[in-house]
Image (cartoon, grey):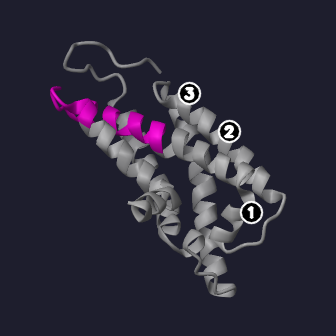
Amino acid sequence: MAAAIRFCMQNFTLTMLILGLIAAGVSLLGKRHTSATISEALFANYLLFSIALAFLYNFVLHVFFGEMTARFIGWGDSPFQAEVGFASLGFSVVGFMAYRGSLDTRAAAVIGPACFLLGAAGGHAVQMVTAHNFAPGNAGIIFYTDIFVPVFGLLLLWLDRRYSGVRDPGNMVRRRH
């Protein structure tokens, strides 16, 4: 059990993505499944789990457990840990705002972290090639989710734009943009 908890906490980006998918599935129980309702459930829970909660967790790790986090990534500790942490806090706050927010707020909650995560993936790749850094926090699941999570978010953003204004099964207009 301890190993499973450690795995989930060390690979929190994957954990949060899976929790978001589970929450989306639960939120759809007993509802009529249209493209718009499925898209909304997936996107809202992606924003809550993969952006708001994952970046809040990242904030805590980099600010309060910076030395441990740097070791996990295969780097030395530095004051930059706090800067990454506070940037993560900003992404988290925007993610919470976007959870039920407008399309513009949702776009900001996806695009900013996408730039950060794709840039981090590039940095991890460079570290793998030049420094042979294959630490779990550099070359493990985190590397792959640094690519997949933003691509998935951009897809959900596109779907949200496509279905915004579509009436849901209860004939209530979705949020205004």
* 91 or 115, nearer to the observer: 91
Instruction: Reply yes or no: does residue 31 show up in magenta.
Output: yes
Q: Residue at x 17, y 32 (%)?
A: 33
* 39 or 74, nearer to the observer: 74
Instruction: Reply yes or no: does residue 2 show up in magenta.
Output: no
> Quadrant where the N terminus lies?
bottom left
Residue 112 higher or lower than 128, as above or below: above
Does the CB distance between marks 1 and 2 fall below 8 Å? no
Mark 1 or 2: the one toward you: 1
The residue to which callout 2 is attached is 90
- Secondary structure that dominates the magenta span: helix
Q: Which residues are magenta?
A: 26-49
Q: Is residue 104 visible?
A: no
Q: Residue at x 47, y 67 (%)?
A: 141
Q: Secondary structure at mark 1?
A: helix
* 176 or 53, nearer to the observer: 53
- The amino acid marked with disc number 2 is Gly
Chain-order first, disc 1 or disc 2: 1
The residue to which callout 3 is attached is 97
